[in-house]
């Protein structure tokens, strides 16, 4: 019974998030177009793109091996698995001890599968793109993991039962701890997370692996038709899931409690409210960031991660530690 | 060192690639992200223009020369006219020279705005592209008002210009300059001189030192960005340019240093936008009254050119650099013996390929865009009604008809019937 409930829930979430994330892509394109004084495509354009790609022939390069065809399916499967661990306004479906690790692992796995697919395509552009993707991956995870674990550790000091679980974020609100040092520290970490989100979904400064004018879409260079459609969908789901993490940490408020709803109605309302919050976070980290910045060189991006964002994360973490240890009281 | 070779990757940038506007091929050997070697292959865009030119008379070649490139169409036209005028010893009226300066500088503004946008696109900064091209619309509209067309405005003819700049055009030009000075230029300067993203990407990318620029004979903003004070309008005292106080623009006046990188080339372009606006204002101020053509009719010109002997070289500083047209007369015929041109992109491409060695792959698109390689032309037009969304594809016949109607609208004195007379590719012979 429980397994049936979980499966149905996951399918429902998968369908909802696919719709919401593709809708967001359309809104994002429209918003960026307006920022650039263009009219932009219709809001439903990503849906049309997806349907068109699904119906088109998929061309497989002669030098490609089997993994080239398997990679899109694996990427989408990992994205759906990721959704089971994503907080969407309520506790994740498979909330257990240590699901934070699984969440980060699955995010990394999607990027890794993209790289495997790109390398097996045999295209030099994809090869360069894969190199860049790996370099970005190892740089961006460190400050984010540091910040995330520090926040969970800070919450565990308040006495939650499962400290390394994403569900913890809903039990105590990090802003409501209230000490000024924590608030400052969380603000610093919010910046770190917005930058991490931008690099996770590869926009603006961090659109380096897919750089269209340099390596012609990088890892995606050889993909077409159904395979590309699966990758596009998987990317959209990943965007939504990564933004959901930021929302769960920094904007965990729900509205169902205020209205007094319970049960399924409360979940649906919270899910919709959560979606709006995700759109707000993505607006800052994706649309605005994309409109006001260009792309960096890979060396500059790596330098930025290790020499700017990691120290920033360290400062935030230190502020949290000082607050807990009571060095300044 | 030998065993390192197997890790090198060869990447073909081109002939068709998102970073390039024109079919040209760069084979880039990479060691990780670092460029070890760059090979340039050209010749994908051979259109046999000289051969077509050998079947047309001097006046018809004007329109062919104009279609060499969609962006510097006036420059080609002007340079060819200068070559023929030098060959036949035709005196150009002073007012015509001033009008040529005005249209040439308007074209420079539109070309430089285009290139600034393209460089923004090459570093993934699409907002710069869209805003730059939006600003460019204004000057293109003005060129349409003056010449009757947004791209190939056919302003030039041998011995003068075909259309006068009237009082209403003058007012429109001054208004446009005011708009650019107040609304566009502050933004452009903010982006290309002070924006940290742009500076991070353009500084130290595609560095062409002064020595290399001279050795490879770089032209235009590419040379001036490296500190070579080379500008045909200034060095050759071209036309009425000396009266207008022309000076080569170098990045030193803006940033104080000359490094020869992409940033410096863009600074030169920003400076030239300011300079072009000043030149247009001065030209409008000093423009004398008088006739605009040496000969009233084209067949008179042709008769005169039939008797011409010898050869002529026209030089002009097109937006991309020095443009040279060479014409050799064929006495007794209205078709030239030889017509040859050299475009500034050719030496610039090799200079930039040399400069890319040792830099990163990410610098390739922006370095190539910074020399502004020329575009090819399109041959069909689709018209979409903005209100109903209906689409109609125009054929060559429709275009000819539209062009004749437009000419009549601008100059009602022409009495010919607005009916196309055969294809444009029909030979004279």
Image (spheres, rainbow, N blue to C red):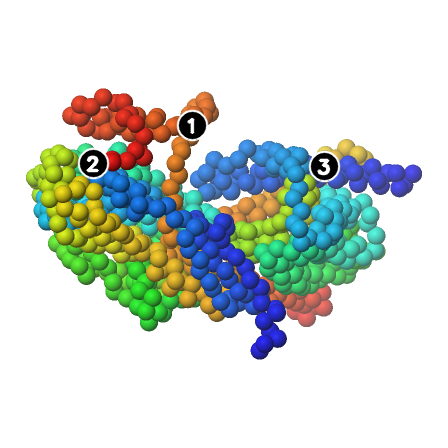
Instruction: Kindly identify which residue carries mark 3.
Output: A16
Q: Residue A132 versus residue A236: which sits nearer the camera?
A: A132
In the picture, which quadrant includes the C terminus of chain B?
A: top left
Query: Could you tell me which secondary element the residue under label 1 belongs to?
Result: strand
Q: State the image coordinates of residue B353 (x, y, percent, origin top left).
A: 42, 63
Q: Estimate how packed mark 1 is, as few (under 14), some (14 to 19) or many (20 or more) residues with alpha carbons within 10 Å.
A: few
Residue at 17 percent of width and 53 percent of height: B312
Residue A2 sits in quarter: top right
Task: Give the mark toward the camera: 3 or 2.
Answer: 2
Q: Estimate how packed mark 2 is, as few (under 14), some (14 to 19) or many (20 or more) residues with alpha carbons within 10 Å.
A: some
Q: Residue B331 versus residue A86: which sits nearer the camera?
A: B331
Q: Estimate how packed mark 3 is, as few (under 14), some (14 to 19) or many (20 or more) residues with alpha carbons within 10 Å.
A: few
What distance separates the C-alpha of mark 3 from that of mark 2?
58 Å
Q: State the image coordinates of residue B194 (x, y, percent, origin top left).
A: 39, 58
Q: State the image coordinates of residue B89 (x, y, percent, origin top left).
A: 10, 49
Q: Residue under mark 2: which chain is it in?
A: B
Residue B17 located left or right of residue B71: right
Query: Which circle marks residue B188 in the picture?
Result: none
Which comes sooner in the sequence, label 1 or label 2?
A: 2
Q: State the image coordinates of residue A138 (x, y, percent, origin top left).
A: 66, 63
Residue B69 located left or right of residue B24: left
Q: Residue under mark 1: which chain is it in?
A: B
Instruction: Kindly identify which residue carries mark 1.
Output: B393
Whether residues under marks 3 and 2 lie with C-beta atoms below 8 angstroms apart, the answer is no
Q: Residue under mark 3: which chain is it in?
A: A
């Amino acid at each position: 019974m429980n397994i049936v409930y979980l499966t149905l829930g996951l399918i429902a979430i998968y369908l909802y998030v696919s719709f919401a994330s593709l809708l967001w892509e359309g809104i994002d394109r429209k918003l960026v177009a307006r920022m650039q004084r263009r009219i932009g495509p219709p809001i439903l354009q990503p849906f049309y793109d997806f349907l068109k790609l699904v119906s088109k022939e998929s061309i497989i390069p002669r030098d490609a091996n089997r993994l080239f065809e398997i990679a899109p399916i694996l990427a989408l499967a990992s994205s759906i698995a990721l959704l089971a661990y994503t907080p969407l306004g309520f506790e994740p479906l498979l909330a257990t001890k240590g699901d934070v690790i699984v969440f980060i692992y699955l995010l990394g796995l999607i990027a890794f599968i993209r790289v495997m697919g790109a390398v097996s395509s045999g295209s030099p552009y994809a090869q360069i793109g894969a190199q860049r993707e790996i370099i970005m991956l190892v740089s961006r995870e460190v400050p984010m993991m540091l910040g995330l674990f520090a926040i969970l550790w800070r919450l565990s000091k308040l006495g939650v039962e499962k400290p390394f679980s994403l569900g913890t974020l809903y039990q105590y609100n990090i802003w409501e701890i209230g000490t000024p040092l924590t608030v400052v520290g969380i603000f610093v970490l919010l910046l770190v997370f917005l930058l991490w989100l931008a690099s996770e979904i590869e926009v603006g400064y961090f659109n380096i692996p897919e750089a269209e004018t340099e390596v012609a879409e990088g890892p995606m260079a050889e993909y077409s038709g159904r395979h590309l459609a699966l990758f596009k969908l998987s990317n959209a789901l990943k965007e939504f899931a990564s933004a959901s993490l930021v929302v769960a940490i920094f904007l965990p408020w729900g509205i169902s409690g205020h209205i007094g709803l319970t049960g399924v109605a409360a979940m649906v309302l919270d899910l919709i409210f959560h979606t709006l919050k995700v759109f707000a976070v993505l607006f800052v980290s994706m649309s605005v960031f994309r409109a006001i910045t260009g792309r960096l060189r890979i060396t500059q991006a790596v330098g930025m991660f290790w020499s700017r964002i990691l120290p920033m994360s360290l400062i935030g973490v230190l502020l949290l530690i000082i607050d807990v240890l009571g060095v300044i009281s | 060192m030998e065993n390192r070779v197997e890790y090198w990757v060869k990447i073909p940038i081109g002939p068709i690639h998102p970073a390039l506007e024109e079919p040209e091929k760069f084979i880039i050997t990479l060691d990780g992200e670092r460029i070890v070697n760059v090979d340039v292959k050209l010749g994908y865009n051979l259109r046999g223009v000289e051969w077509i030119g050998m079947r047309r008379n001097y006046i018809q070649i004007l329109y062919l020369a104009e279609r060499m490139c969609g962006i510097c169409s006036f420059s080609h036209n002007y340079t060819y006219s200068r070559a023929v005028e030098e060959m036949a010893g035709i005196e150009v009226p002073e007012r015509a020279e001033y009008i040529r300066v005005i249209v040439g500088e308007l074209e420079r503004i539109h070309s430089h705005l285009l290139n600034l946008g393209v460089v923004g696109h090459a570093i993934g900064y699409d907002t710069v592209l869209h805003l730059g091209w939006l600003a460019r619309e204004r000057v293109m509209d003005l060129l349409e008002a003056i010449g009757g067309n947004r791209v190939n405005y056919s302003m030039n003819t041998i011995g003068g210009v075909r259309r006068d700049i009237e009082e209403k055009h003058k007012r429109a030009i001054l208004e446009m300059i005011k708009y650019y000075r107040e609304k566009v230029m502050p933004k452009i300067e903010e982006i290309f001189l002070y924006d940290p993203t742009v500076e991070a990407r353009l500084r130290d990318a595609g560095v062409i030192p002064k020595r290399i620029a001279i050795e490879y004979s770089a032209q235009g903003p590419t040379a001036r960005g490296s500190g070579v004070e080379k500008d045909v309008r200034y060095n050759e005292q071209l036309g009425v340019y000396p009266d207008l106080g022309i000076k080569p623009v170098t990045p030193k006046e803006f940033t104080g240093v000359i490094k020869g990188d992409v940033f410096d080339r863009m600074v030169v372009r920003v400076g030239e936008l300011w300079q072009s606006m000043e030149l247009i204002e001065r030209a409008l101020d000093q423009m004398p009254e008088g006739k605009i053509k040496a000969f009233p009719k084209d067949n008179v010109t042709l008769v005169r050119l039939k008797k011409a002997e010898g050869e002529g070289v026209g030089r002009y500083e097109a937006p991309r650099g020095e443009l040279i047209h060479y014409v050799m007369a064929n006495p007794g015929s209205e078709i030239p013996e030889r017509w040859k041109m050299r475009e500034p992109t050719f030496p610039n491409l090799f200079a930039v390929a040399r400069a890319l060695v040792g830099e990163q792959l990410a610098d390739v698109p922006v370095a190539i865009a910074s020399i502004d390689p020329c575009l090819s032309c399109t041959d069909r037009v689709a018209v979409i009604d903005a209100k109903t969304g209906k689409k109609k594809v125009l054929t060559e016949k429709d275009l000819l008809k539209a062009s004749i109607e437009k000419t009549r609208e601008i100059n009602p004195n022409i009495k010919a019937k607005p009916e196309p007379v055969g294809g444009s590719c029909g030979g004279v012979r």
